[in-house]
Amino acid sequence: MIDFQTLLLFSAASLALAVTPGPDMILVAARSAAQGRTAGLVTQFGVSAGSAFHAIILALGLSQLFLAIPYAYDLVRYLGAAYLIFLAWQAFAARGGSAPQSPSNHRMSLLVIFRQGFLSNVLNPKVALFYLALFPQFLAPERGAIAVQILVLACVFLIIDFAVHGVVIWLAGGMKSLAARGRRYSNWPRYFLGMVFGGLAARLIFDGQR
């Protein structure tokens, strides 16, 4: 089993990484500012589910395919960029207005938000490479099954990441009230969200160096 000192060092590294602004933090902050804290929290659940997926893939040894087959990395990268561009287009093309939603529509919208957070993370191959770069430094065969160690470390990382992003969600969610002060500002949240999606897509396309 992983010893306490290793867990402590890994937690410190995870905290340092979690507080460093990255695509996931930008996405949950933009979603919270545009649609409120609930939407930001649901987005974070999706992002965390995507990270858990990458951890499972790493535990199964499949993440190394990105190193062995460069085309696989580029394929996933461009699919992810295309999906983010689609989300940006949806944000800009969405109709304004604040008509009340039925409970069923609200649940469906939260499902869509969760799916967007999940897919934006899963379709980013840099997350898989991040796991490949970080986790092996804290693994040791003599401590037991490597797959179990990976899953334990992944749980620690997800808890720390969720806690840090929870603060971001709470702070950014307060900005949503600015849009409620008048019609003049009613459309800026979705435009802002669209620009974030577009920026993340551009980053994924042009920042192709691994």
Image (tube, rainbow, N blue to C red):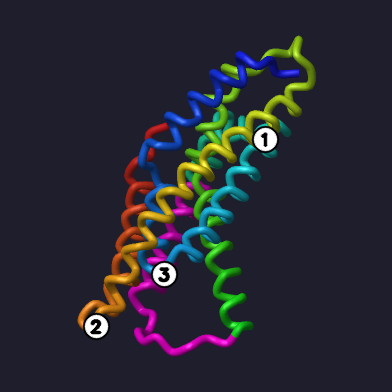
Which secondary structure, mark 2?
Answer: loop
Location of residue 69 in the rendering, given as x and y in whole percent from the top left corner: 57, 34
Location of residue 160 in the rendering, given as x and y in whole percent from the top left corner: 54, 37
Question: Which region is colored magenta?
Answer: 75-102
Query: Toward which corner of the image does residue 148 lie, by quadrant?
Result: top right
Task: Find the distance from the CA under tag 3 to the CA under tag 1.
Answer: 36 Å
- In the rendered structure, which amino acid carries the disc numbered 2? Gly
Q: Which residue is mark 3?
A: 35
- In the rendered structure, which amino acid carries the disc numbered 1? Leu
Q: Nearer the viewer, residue 58 or 10?
A: 10
Q: Which residue is mark 2?
A: 182
Task: Find the distance from the CA under tag 1 to the CA under tag 2.
Answer: 51 Å
Q: Residue at coordinates 57% horizontally, 78% vertically from top-left?
A: 106
Which secondary structure, mark 3?
Answer: helix
Q: Is residue 146 above or below residue 151?
A: above
Q: Nearer the viewer, residue 195 or 74?
A: 195
Quarter in which the N terminus is drawn = top right
Q: Which residue is mark 1?
A: 62
